[in-house]
Image (cartoon, rainbow, N blue to C red):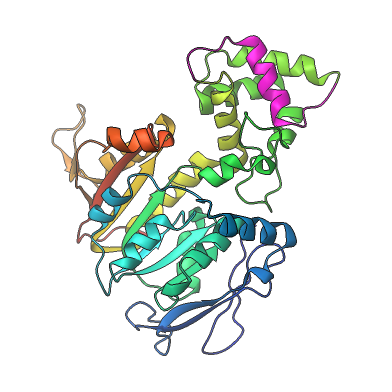
């Protein structure tokens, strides 16, 4: 569960992050009163952080990545996202999916201020260290982006000049076998973005009835063989529960032939990850709240990585960018109560061939941009 920021002092607020993070404190000070109207004496958002505040396993992993010079994650469509967000000094942005901090770093380098949000404590620790030299303009909070409005209200923020959602899973998460996201590496069937979340992929696989498993694979993975796979899982778990990623991947591979470079278990693993983290519902809830926080002229940039996400984003932006609604049974078009955005581009932007060549995980990405109109919306 997300950690809210308690009120400890009259002029400051602090929050601790994640398991073992009670010494990792965030301190608000020195941000303009325009950004924090509820705290006119606050003039910024600073954090005090040291790797020693992390749990031992996260601390060692964090140090290993830094010492080896490993890339936590290579942000996709980085320059394009920065271009469309139009960062400049004085502007305030929310990076609602902070990850390794690539997008935030680009915005900060242009003089903007950034609040970073992520539910993964390992991602937060890496991003905080990476962006520590921007501590007068950057702050990070652990939380799910579905709760960004509540989080911003808690720290006294009144509005944003831009917001970015990079919906992809980070390379670090995929490559870390202990997280259970990869079908290529043996590890526990976990798949939780937030390690404090209750339900793991193993619990779903070992407890869901056959019909529910088939539905998850079909709806969240668009897997045509969903029923065959679900049936095989039920038969296998009569003898032994699933514990390891390679157990599940091997079962799927025994049912479906490998075609090309794509592993047969790709869609099944995607479906489980979406189900474990409730990703589609989280996205819908976050999108619905964004208009209340973007200032007129502020921009929303969303980078999606599969058709289910992109369909939700595309439908939402289409619904909110039409001033009138027309239906055959109506005598004339009616005003659209959701109208609040202007589409900056009609079609989504995809990565260049050069980017896909250097970063194959970018191949399915699609970027969409909308600009907030000076129109009031119902909360």
Above or below for 196 versus 39: above
Furthest residue toward left = 332
With 240 as the anchor, is 177 left or right in this view?
left
**Residue segment shown in magenta:** 240-261
Q: Is residue 199 left or right of residue 169?
A: right
Residue 314 placement: quadrant? top left
Determine the residue positioned at 63% across, 43% down: 176
Q: Residue at x 73, y 37 (%)?
A: 188
Q: Nearer the viewer, residue 313 or 379?
A: 313
Left or right of residue 118, residue 336 in this image? left
Residue 9: x %, y % from top left? 58, 88
| Residue 375, picture quadrant | bottom left
Quadrant containing the C terminus is bottom left
User: Can you tell which quarter of the image residue 248 is in?
Assistant: top right
Q: Residue at x 66, y 43 (%)?
A: 179
Q: Residue at x 32, y 67 (%)?
A: 109
Q: Is residue 249 magenta?
A: yes
Locate residue 160, reporting x and y percent: 33, 66
Check the picture and name the quadrant holding the N terminus. bottom right
């Amino acid at each position: 569960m997300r950690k809210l920021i308690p009120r400890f002092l009259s002029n400051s607020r602090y929050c601790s992050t994640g398991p073992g993070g009670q010494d990792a404190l965030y301190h608000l000070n020195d941000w303009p009163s325009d950004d924090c109207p509820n705290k006119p004496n606050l003039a910024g958002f600073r954090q005090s952080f040291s790797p020693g505040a992390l749990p031992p396993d996260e601390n060692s992993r964090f140090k290993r990545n830094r010492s080896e010079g490993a890339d936590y994650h290579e942000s996709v469509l980085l320059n394009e996202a920065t271009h469309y967000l139009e960062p400049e000094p004085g502007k305030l942005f929310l990076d609602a999916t902070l990850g390794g901090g690539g997008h935030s770093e680009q915005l900060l380098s242009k003089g903007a201020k950034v609040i970073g949000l992520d539910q993964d404590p390992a991602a937060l620790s890496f991003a905080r260290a990476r962006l520590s030299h921007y501590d007068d303009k950057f702050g990070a909070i652990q939380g799910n982006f579905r709760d960004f409005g509540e989080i911003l209200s808690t720290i006294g923020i009144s509005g944003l000049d831009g917001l970015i959602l990079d919906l992809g899973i980070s390379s670090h998460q995929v490559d870390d076998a202990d997280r259970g996201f990869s079908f290529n590496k043996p590890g526990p069937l976990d798949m939780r973005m937030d390690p404090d979340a209750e339900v793991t992929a193993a619990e779903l696989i070992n407890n869901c009835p056959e019909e529910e498993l088939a539905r998850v694979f079909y709806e969240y993975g668009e897997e045509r063989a969903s029923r065959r796979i679900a049936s095989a899982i039920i038969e296998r778990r009569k003898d032994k529960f699933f514990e390891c990623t390679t157990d599940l991947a091997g079962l799927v591979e025994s049912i479906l032939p490998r075609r090309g470079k794509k592993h047969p278990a790709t869609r099944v693993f995607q479906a489980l990850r979406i189900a474990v983290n409730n990703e589609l519902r989280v996205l819908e809830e976050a999108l619905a709240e964004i208009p209340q926080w973007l200032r007129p002229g502020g921009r929303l940039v969303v980078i999606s990585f599969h058709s289910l996400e992109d369909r939700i984003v595309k439908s939402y932006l289409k619904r909110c960018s039409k001033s009138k609604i027309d239906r055959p049974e109506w005598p004339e078009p009616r005003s659209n109560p959701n109208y609040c955005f202007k589409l900056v581009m009609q079609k989504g932007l995809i990565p260049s061939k050069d980017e896909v060549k250097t970063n194959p995980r970018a191949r399915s990405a699609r970027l969409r941009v909308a600009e907030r109109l000076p129109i009031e919306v119902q909360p």
